[in-house]
Image (cartoon, rainbow, N blue to C red):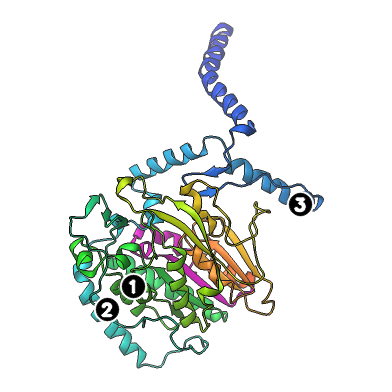
């Protein structure tokens, strides 16, 4: 049994050990409440952070005001950017690179390119055989004449594009050619098969509820901008074939939106940024044209939108290579016609689906579309009170795309699937929507590590 003196010394030793921890905790608590240190924007995530919620009696009684304070407190915590970066680096040491999933990096895309032609032939033969058998599928609206200049079903074996005489500069999985940075994307049979099966599973559940489902994998810049010869030379997959392979395995309940040919027919235009992994608002419009063709809508001509140029833009890859060799980018957006407003929790003063970011830092301007990535954004077209509602699941490729959908629906619920794990069938039924649209980089379909994001969604 310890003596009183031994107990006293033991307590003093425990206090000595706890002292540094309590000191750090006290400092962090003090820092947390220093408002001037709280950031207003996230350079890493390229978005404005949550604002302190406005007080009202209604929000106080409902509890929304306190929820808003909690969200603001965690979103604007001083040093949050550094802590997130440290967390991602630790995850990367264990093979969990979140940025790779977000960008659809070719490093996770597999090496089955040599098998793609044979696999595609088998998949399309099987699809043709199934088409001859009677199949119960959800009734869709009649399709209008093809709105875009390109037939999505045409097989294109070769095309012109970027193909500099000099050797392409390589930066890991990034390639710089003719002043444009692109990520090399391969083909993974395992990931493609799983992605197609998930699309079928989700579409079947939605069809039972009378809800249409559309799958739009967004091609990346390397698949559209590079010439077919240079694409093969750089050992990149033909994304047109990848899409055909996945679509051949999807059933009739999946609305297959293949924007590849329409984008390819415009690859001499400004459809992708030179320094960023996203398509431009123009590229997203050509994908929207193809969506309309599949969904049974007449696309609203781009001439009816108001074009705005918000100035210089530097994308996510600008500092990953030699910036002096990258062509200049501008942030061009198209304000939709009609009486349309946007609703985002935590941003009561941001009401336009295209937000003026002219005075923002050049690397923050992609946030002009829907005010960046948020868990949920709602677009409301008051000119179409009797139109159906739509639910869009998306990554950041869907931000400029979703703006165009407000021309055909009363409400467009835009959910970032990276922050929402509830099954799409449950959410769609709760919101009472007629259509569900999935818009994501094709790179996600080539990454097994990204499939987990879709497992719960497609139930």
Circle 3 SS class: helix
Spatial separation of the CA atoms under disc 3 and disc 1 = 49 Å
Q: Which residue is disc 1 drawn over?
A: 264
Q: Residue at x 31, y 89 (%)?
A: 129
Q: Mark 3 points at which residue?
A: 59
Task: Specify the quadrant of the image occupied by residue 25.
Answer: top right
Residue 429 at x, y percent in the picture: 61, 73
Q: Nearer the viewer, residue 392 or 226?
A: 226
At 47% across and 60% down in the image, what residue appears?
395
Residue 252's place in the image compared with 57, above or below, is below
Residue positioned most to the top: 5
Q: Where are the magenta residues, as a range?
A: 432-459
Distance Cα–Cα, label 2 vs label 1 = 10 Å
Give the foreground label among 3 and 1: 1
The magenta stretch spans residue 252: no
Establish if 268 lies above or below 45. Answer: below
Toward the viewer: 181 or 164?
Answer: 164
């Amino acid at each position: 049994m310890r003596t009183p003196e031994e107990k006293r010394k033991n307590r003093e030793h425990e206090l000595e050990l706890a002292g540094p921890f309590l000191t750090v905790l006290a400092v962090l608590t003090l820092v947390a409440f220093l408002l001037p240190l709280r950031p207003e924007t996230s350079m890493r995530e390229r978005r404005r952070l949550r604002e302190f919620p406005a007080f009202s009696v209604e929000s106080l009684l409902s509890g929304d005001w306190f929820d808003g304070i909690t969200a603001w407190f965690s979103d604007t915590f001083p040093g949050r950017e550094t802590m997130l970066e440290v967390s991602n680096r630790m995850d990367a040491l264990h093979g969990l690179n979140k940025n790779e999933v977000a960008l659809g990096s070719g490093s996770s895309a597999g090496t089955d390119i040599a098998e793609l032609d044979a696999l595609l032939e088998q998949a399309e033969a099987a699809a043709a055989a199934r088409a001859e058998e009677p199949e119960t599928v959800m009734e869709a609206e009649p399709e209008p004449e093809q709105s875009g200049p390109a037939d999505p079903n045409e097989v294109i074996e070769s095309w012109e594009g970027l193909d500099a005489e000099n050797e392409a500069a390589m930066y890991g999985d990034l390639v710089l050619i003719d002043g444009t940075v692109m990520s090399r994307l391969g083909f993974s049979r395992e990931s493609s098969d799983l992605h197609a099966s998930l699309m079928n599973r989700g579409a079947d559940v939605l069809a039972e509820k009378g809800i249409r489902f559309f799958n739009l994998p967004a091609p990346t810049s390397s698949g559209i901008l590079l010439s077919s010869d240079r694409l093969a030379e750089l050992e990149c997959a033909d994304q047109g074939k990848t899409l055909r392979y996945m679509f051949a395995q999807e059933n009739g309940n999946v609305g297959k939106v293949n924007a590849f040919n329409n984008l390819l027919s415009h690859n001499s235009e400004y459809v992708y940024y030179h320094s960023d992994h996203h398509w431009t608002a123009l590229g997203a419009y050509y994908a929207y044209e193809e969506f309309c063709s599949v969904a049974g809508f007449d696309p609203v001509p781009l001439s009816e939108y108001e074009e705005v140029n918000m100035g210089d833009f530097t994308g996510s890859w600008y500092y990953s290579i030699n910036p002096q060799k990258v062509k200049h980018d501008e942030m061009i957006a198209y304000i939709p016609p009609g009486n349309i407003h946007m609703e985002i929790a935590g941003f009561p003063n941001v009401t336009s689906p295209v937000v003026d970011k002219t005075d923002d830092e050049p690397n923050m301007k992609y946030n002009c579309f829907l005010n960046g990535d948020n868990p949920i954004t709602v677009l409301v077209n008051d000119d179409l009170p009797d139109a159906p509602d739509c639910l869009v699941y998306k990554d950041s490729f869907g931000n400029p795309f979703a703006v165009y959908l407000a021309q055909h629906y009363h409400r467009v619920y835009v959910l970032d699937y990276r922050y929402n794990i509830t099954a799409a069938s449950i959410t769609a039924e709760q919101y009472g929507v007629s259509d569900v649209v999935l818009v994501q980089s094709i790179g996600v379909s080539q990454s097994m590590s990204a499939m987990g994001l879709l497992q719960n969604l497609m139930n």
